[in-house]
Every structure is written in C-alpha cells, then in structure tokens.
C-alpha cells in the first residue's frame, strides 16, 4: 500500500539509520579513546571493578615510593654497620697485638683511638632522611634469663620497630589495608644507645656498652644457678682460713679467686644477699685503653683475686670479640631486611603490571575489531542514507500519476 500520509518505508529506513548512528558513535568513541568501557553506562559492573582497581594500583605506586625510601634507610644503616664491623675487627687485632709484653702499648693505643673516633663518625654519619638507625635510646625491656638470674637485658629502641610500607591489599569484603615490613632493633643492633637498666641510666649500644663485671657463677643448695657479687679484698680483713675472711661484721669466701659474701665462718655462701649482679665499669669498646691494664685488672677481678695485668687483656679481647659478633649479627639482620625490601619491590612492580593488564582486559577496546567495525558501520550508514532517500522519493512518484 502506498500512502502520502504515512511513509512506512521512510520510517523503517530512519530507524535503521538511528541505530547505525548510535553504533557508529560508540565505535568511534572506542577508536578515539581506546576503551570499550569508558563510563558506567557502557558496563556498570566492569566500570566499577576497573575504577576500584585503578585506585588500588595508584596506591601500589605510593608503596613503591615507600619501599624505595625504606630501602635507602636500610642500606644506609647496613653500610654503616658493615664499616663498623671492619673497624671493630681492627680494634680486636690491635688488642691481640697488645698482649705481647714487649710491645709499646702507647703506640697501639694511638691506633685504637683513631679507630674509636672512626666508629663514632660512622654512627653519626649513617643517617638518611633524618633517621639514624645506628644511634638511639633504649625504651622497652627484653630480658634473657639463665636459671633464676637475669644476665642479659636488651632494650628496644624508642618508638618500637622500624616500619617500611610493604604492600596494600583489599580482602573479599572490600576492606582495604596496608601491610608493613617491621624491623625490631635492640641495643644489640645499634652502635650507640642510652637506656635505663634497673633504674640506672647506662650506655647500652654495641660500641658504648660497658664491660659488665662483678659476678662469678655458682650453684646454690637447691641447684639454682646464681651469679655472685664480687667484693674487692681489703687489707683490714681478718683471715679465718685461706679461703674465708672476716671484716668485723660479715664473712667473705674466696671462690675461684674472687671474694664473695659468706654466711658464716665456714664459708657457706649467702645467696640471698650476693645474687644481684649488674655491676659495670667505665670501660667500653669506644673508650678502652690498653695502657690501663693494671687499673682494669682491679675492676675486672678485684684486688688480689688474680694477677690483673696477666688477665685483663684477655677480658678486653673476649669482650671486643663479643661486640664484634653483635655487630656482625646486626649487619646480617639489616642485610636480610634489605633483601626482603628488594624482593617486595620487584613483586609490587609485577603486581602493578598484572593489575594494569587485568583492568585492560575488562575495559580496553580491541582496536583491530573496532577499526573493522567502524569501516563497516560507515558503509552501512551510507547505504542507509541512500535507502532513506529512496523511501522519501515515493511521494514524488505518486505525484507523477496525477500529471
């Protein structure tokens, strides 16, 4: 049926042309932006996922920056501790040389003082972004027990563990959180530190911790291990026998060459009054002096306990070797955390690439398909325009019948 009121062919052609125009706009948008899902109306679910993951991926970029900063801090501390290990080894070597009675200890002490100054320089210089992990102040206690006696007290540094942002994650419930790489530093991990032990403020770092003396091991009648306080011999003591002395009030027993408080004239040890042993000297790795071995011997062993000069150098060497082991352990701890940060940095980089790729699979346009579809739609548009022109010419054909 042909009508001059309603042109059904034209209406149909126009509808086809509108659909083609809509598809053409979408395809042109994909070609120009490279995205198949650019707004929520394109695909609400995919757009929501992609927008959230882009935000998380941006957070991972911040994590990479934080890891870089953390790595710089750890590497700075590691470099300082590694240098300190070399310096402490040199000090130990000089002490071994000083054990020779025919050597000029004053000359050796001059070398040791230069090494001690170098230790302080290393500690003060090992700073990055205002943080120095080799110098600190002890805060929280970590006590190590042996039997019933506290024989080692560590202090964690003020502020708790050092933290480096390591990653971010979103769980299945959509909760977002940040994880950190934590490094617990104690006074056995830093070169110089101050701390309070049993109410007394002391130097407690590797380089400035004083040699702890004043105790000898013993076992009480109940089988408990004890550390007994050393007393220095006094000439006014009366000798009860070769091993027991009396000062008019208390008895003192000679135990392994040391004098400790006794309970009575039989030399029975008064464990209750002699078990407290946190005594110190003013001798540390950073200020020891091999020209003062006689003076040190009295501090280490008490008067007449043992020949001071013969054994004092052994105490120094043993002590420095122990501090060297602590410095080595600290360097190993810093090295391991540095390796972990490097591994985490590599993982975060790969994770960002994976997220970016996953987002692309959801919302990116396939450009080959889009380009081919664009050409096809442009051809269909041209044909639809021609069809509309033909449909619109039907009324003219009717007019020809009335001529």
Image (cartoon, helix red, strand yellow):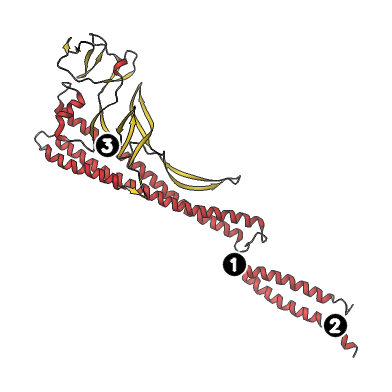
Task: Relative to 269, say whether 176 is above or below.
Answer: below
Dot 1 crowding, Cα within 10 Å, few <14, some 14–19, many 20+: few
Using the image as rendered, state which of residue 379 and residue 140 is in the foreground.
Answer: 140
Residue beneath label 3, please? 208
Along the polypeptide, which appears first: circle 2 or circle 3?
3
x and y, in percent, of residue 358 in the image? 57, 56
Image quarter (top left, top right, bottom left or bottom right) of the N terminus: bottom right
Q: Are marks 2 and 1 in contact (CB under 8 Å)?
A: no
| Viewer-nearest of discs 3 and 1 | 3
Along the polypeptide, which appears first: circle 3 or circle 1?
1
Task: Relative to 204, say whether 39 is above or below.
Answer: below
Q: Is residue 124 left or right of residue 375?
A: left
Residue beneath label 2, please? 395
Using the image as rendered, state which of residue 271 and residue 90 is in the foreground.
Answer: 271
x and y, in percent, of residue 349 in the image? 47, 54
Classify residue 400 by image quadrant: bottom right
Q: Which residue does the image show at 17% across and 13% down from the upper left?
A: 237
Q: Is residue 95 left or right of residue 141?
A: left
Image quarter (top left, top right, bottom left or bottom right) of the C terminus: bottom right
Task: Relative to 200, say whether 238 is above or below.
Answer: above
Could you say whether the residue bearing mark 1 is in a helix, strand or loop? helix
Q: Can you tell which mark lies on residue 289?
A: none
Along the polypeptide, which appears first: circle 2 or circle 1?
1
Q: Is residue 82 left or right of residue 397?
A: left
Task: Relative to 172, say whether 256 is above or below.
Answer: above
Dot 2 crowding, Cα within 10 Å, few <14, some 14–19, many 20+: some
Q: Can you tell which mark lies on residue 33?
A: 1
Q: CA distance from mark 2 to mark 1?
A: 43 Å
Q: Which residue does the image show at 31% across and 21% down from the upper left?
A: 276
x and y, in percent, of residue 342 in the image? 41, 50
């Amino acid at each position: 049926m042909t009508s001059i009121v309603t042109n059904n062919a034209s209406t149909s052609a126009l509808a086809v042309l509108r659909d083609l125009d809509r598809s053409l706009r979408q395809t042109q948008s994909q070609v120009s932006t490279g995205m198949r899902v650019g707004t929520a109306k394109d695909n609400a679910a995919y757009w929501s996922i992609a927008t959230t993951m882009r935000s998380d991926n941006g957070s991972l970029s911040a994590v990479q920056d934080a890891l870089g900063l953390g790595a710089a801090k750890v590497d700075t501390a590691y470099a300082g501790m590694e240098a300190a290990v070399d310096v402490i080894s040199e000090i130990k070597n000089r002490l071994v040389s000083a054990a020779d009675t025919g050597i000029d200890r004053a000359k050796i002490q001059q070398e040791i003082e230069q090494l001690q100054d170098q230790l302080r320089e290393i500690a003060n210089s090992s700073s990055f972004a205002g943080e120095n992990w080799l110098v600190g102040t002890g805060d929280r206690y970590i006590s190590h027990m042996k039997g019933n006696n506290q024989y080692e007290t560590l202090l964690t540094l003020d502020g708790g563990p050092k933290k480096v942002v390591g990653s971010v994650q979103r769980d299945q419930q959509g909760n977002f959180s940040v994880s950190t790489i934590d490094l617990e530093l104690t006074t056995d991990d830093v070169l110089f530190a101050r701390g309070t032990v049993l109410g007394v403020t002391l130097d407690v770092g590797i380089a400035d911790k004083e040699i702890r003396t004043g105790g000898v091991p013993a076992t009480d009648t109940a089988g408990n291990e004890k550390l007994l306080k050393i007393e220095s011999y006094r000439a006014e003591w009366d000798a009860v026998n070769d091993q027991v002395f009396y000062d008019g009030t208390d008895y003192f027993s000679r135990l392994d060459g040391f004098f400790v408080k006794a309970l009575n004239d039989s030399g029975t040890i008064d464990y209750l009054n002699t078990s407290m042993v946190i005594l110190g000297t003013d001798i540390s790795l950073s200020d020891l002096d091999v020209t003062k071995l006689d003076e040190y011997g009295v501090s280490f062993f008490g008067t007449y306990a043992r020949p001071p000069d013969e054994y004092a150098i052994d105490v120094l060497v043993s002590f420095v070797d122990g501090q060297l082991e602590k410095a080595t352990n600290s360097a190993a701890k810093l090295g391991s955390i540095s390796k972990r940060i490097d591994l985490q940095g590599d993982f975060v980089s790969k994770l960002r690439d994976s997220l970016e790729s996953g987002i692309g699979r959801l919302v990116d346009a396939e450009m080959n398909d889009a380009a081919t579809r664009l050409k096809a739609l442009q051809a269909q548009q041209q044909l639809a325009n021609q069809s509309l022109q033909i449909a619109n010419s039907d009324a003219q054909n009717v007019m020809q019948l009335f001529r």
